[in-house]
Amino acid sequence: MALKDIFAGAVVTTKLKEVVAWGRKNSLWPMPYATACCGIEFMGTVSSYFDISRFGAELVRFSPRQCDLLIVLGTINYKQAPILKKFYDQMCEPKWVISAGACASSGGFYNNYSVVQGIDEIIPVDVYVPGCPPAPEAILHAVLKIQEKIDSEARNTVELLPAV
Amino acid sequence: MMIERLQQVFPNEVLSTYTTAVGEAVAVLRKDKLHDVLAYLNQNSDCLCEALLDLCGVDYLSQLKPGEARFEVVYQLYSYQHNHRLRLRVKIPAEDMTLPSATDLWVGANWFEREAFDMFGFQFAGHPHLKRILMFEGFEGHPLRKDYPIEKRQKIPFPQEIP
């Protein structure tokens, strides 16, 4: 059945930015920044059993220039911090960050001289995922939260028309 | 036995000796003629410790008694030729943290000494490149010293500061 037959002449009105947001939230390009065991959980999340592709975020790229969702999985120490910051700076706008697991969110149990006490000291974070490591369902929940955020950003921001 | 020979040759340097419960020979040393002792153990045909298995630091701050040195540098030596081992505990007072480098005797001492410098602040005189090896440039203090504050946080290095 062709598309024109499905809609059967009906007209759908929407706003351009909402269409853009709808496209963005359903085709997130994640980049895992995995430094510890949380990265193993992410491998489970992207593969067939939990299948992150049900939410349109399956195509993992290992270049920050091709991604819009940075998922930080694992302990970030002081020597790693400038590298993570550089990765974040290389990503194009719009971009979102998930801090997955206790270490990335707060330093975890590494309350010591070498570990950054939460990546929000370096880069902005949209969603924090608790757990050590978080279960795949928790990471999927974080993706859903990011989708909600993208949606609400499009709905709740008012753009002024440029002066003619 | 290597340990008795060491006592005969360097009677003023060896403070005490003992053997652990599992039969490991240990000598406690002063640091004054440390390089002579190490060279002797490395080169004398009866000792011939070709391998420096490990070198590390210890901080005895919480067990410090008056008149005792606060730090120790521990050398683990091994001879392939004779199949014998020796542990040297060298007393290092906090007022004078310099001791001779062993890099001219064992090339492998290079990174061990850099690590001990990084973590405790020992100054190895004659080391070719005594820079931090684990912590980043700009790190303040020596984190494995027992008086390093647990809650102390350093300034996070940022990309433009990477040389």
Image (tube, coloured by chain):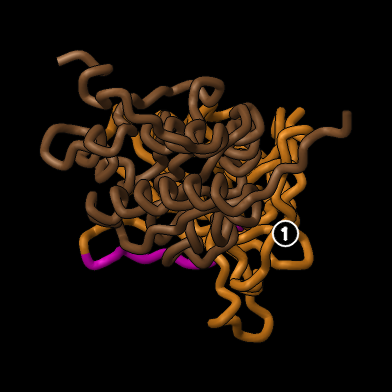
Chain colours: A brown, B orange
Q: Principal SS element in the magenta part?
A: strand
Q: Residue furthest bottom?
A: B66
Q: Is residue A99 left or right of residue A159?
A: left
Vertical relation: A151 (above or below) B81: below
* Foreground of the two, B9 or A3: A3
Q: Residue furthest top?
A: A2
Q: What percent of the width, then of the height, locates residue A149? A: 49, 51
Q: Residue furthest left?
A: A49
Residue B83 falls in image quadrant: top left
Q: Residue furthest right?
A: A164
- The residue drawn where x is 40% and y is 33% is A12
The crowding category of the residue bearing disc 1, from other C-alpha atoms within 10 Å (few below 14, some 14 to 19, many at least 20), is some
Q: Count the marks: how many?
A: 1
Q: What percent of the width, then of the height, locates residue B39? A: 56, 35
- The residue drawn where x is 43% and y is 36% is A22
Give the magenta range: B13-21
- The residue drawn where x is 36% and y is 47% is A143
* Foreground of the two, A15 or B152: A15
Label 1: which secondary element: loop
Q: What percent of the width, then of the height, locates residue B10? A: 56, 52
Q: Is residue B69 magenta?
A: no
Vertical relation: A59 (above or below) A34: above
Residue A30 seen in the current view: no
**Residue type highlighted by circle 1:** Gly
* Foreground of the two, B136 or B46: B136
Chain letter of disc 1? B
Q: Quadrant of the C terminus of chain A?
A: top right
Residue A163 seen in the current view: yes
Query: In this figure, which residue is indicated by the disc labeled 1?
Result: B141
Q: What percent of the width, then of the height, locates residue A71? A: 44, 42
